[in-house]
Image (spheres, rainbow, N blue to C red):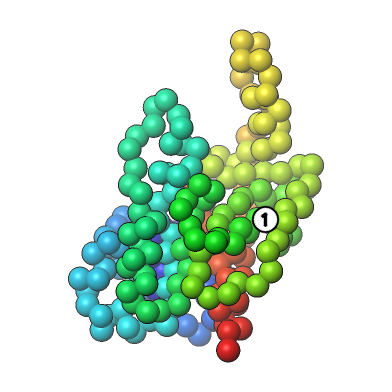
Amino acid sequence: MLDLFCKAGGAAMGLHRAFPNAEITGVDIEPQPRYPFKFVREDVLFIELMGPEWVNQFDFIWASPPCQHYCALNTMKNRRPHKNLVGKVRELLKATGKPYCIENVFGAPLNHPLMLCGSFFGLESNGFQLRRHRYFETNFPTGLRFACNHKRKTLGVYGAKVRDTAQEKRHYAKDKETRGEPVGVVLPQKYGFEAMGINWMNIEELAEAIPPAYSEYIANQWKGQP
C-alpha cells in the first residue's frame, strides 16, 4: 500500500489495521522520523519518475495532499500562497490504474466525496467528542453516507493545540471589542491524542493527521469489493 503525502502516518496506521499483513510505504517531501512504516523522502509529484515498475508493486494508493489552499487559513489576512494540488494528484492516480483514495478538507475540489467525522466512530476523551470532518474521494464504492451526531462537548486539534471547539465558538461569537482573551479553550494535549487514537506523534504532527479509524474504514470498504 502506497501512502502519499504521508506526514507522520495517521492514515497509514488505519490502512495497517485493515490489512495487517500489507507492506506500507509512505512518501513525503519532508523527513518523517516518527512514521511507523517504511518511508521514502521524495516529492510526490515526481513519483512517476520512479517508473511504472515501482508504482505497480502497490495494490492500493492513499493520498493526502496539503489542505492549506482550501481550508480556513486561506481566508486570513496574513495568509501565504499554497499550491492547489488535488487535480494534479487525481491525474497522477488515475494514470496508475490502481484503486485510490484522496483525502482532504471541506472546500477541496473532490469528486463526490464521503465525509467522515469523529462522531461516527465514538472517538472521544474525557467527555469531549472529536470534531474532525475530513472528505474522501475514491474510485470504488464507499458504502453508506453518514450524518454527524455531535455531543455538546467537542474538541478539535489544530494550530498545534487541543481545543474545546464549542467554548471557542462561543467566545468568538461575542463582540470583538469586549470579549477579551479566550478562557478555557485550550485542553490538555492528552485529550487530543486519546480522541484521535494516536500515541506516536508530537502535537504538531497530530494537528495534521487524520484518525486511523477513518482510513481503516475506507480500506475496509475497498476490501469488501468483489
On screen, residue 16 above or below 91: below
On screen, residue 104 above or below 221: above
**Front one among 205 and 79:** 79
Q: Is residue 52 left or right of residue 214?
A: left
Q: Residue 215, percent across and down?
A: 55, 67
Outermost residue, bottom side: 226
Mark 1 = which residue?
A: 118
* Residue under the point 40% across and 79% down: 98
Q: Is residue 163 left or right of residue 129?
A: left
Decide if residue 193 is in sight here.
Answer: no
Q: Is residue 53 left or right of residue 80?
A: left
Write down the quadrant of residue 88 in the picture: bottom left
Which quarter of the figure is the C terminus placed in? bottom right
* Residue under the point 42% across and 64% down: 63
Q: Residue 15, percent across and down?
A: 52, 73
* Residue under the point 67% across and 55% down: 118
- The crowding category of the residue bearing disc 1, from other C-alpha atoms within 10 Å (few below 14, some 14 to 19, many at least 20), is many
- Is label 1 in a helix, a strand or a loop? helix
**Front one among 75 and 207:** 75
The kind of residue tagged 1 is Gly
Q: Residue 222, percent across and down?
A: 55, 79
* Residue under the point 32% across and 68% down: 92
Task: Report the label total.
Answer: 1
Which quarter of the figure is the N terminus placed in? bottom left
Decide if residue 167 is in sight here.
Answer: yes
On screen, residue 224 above or below 129: below
Q: Residue 201, percent across and down?
A: 49, 55
Outermost residue, front side: 112
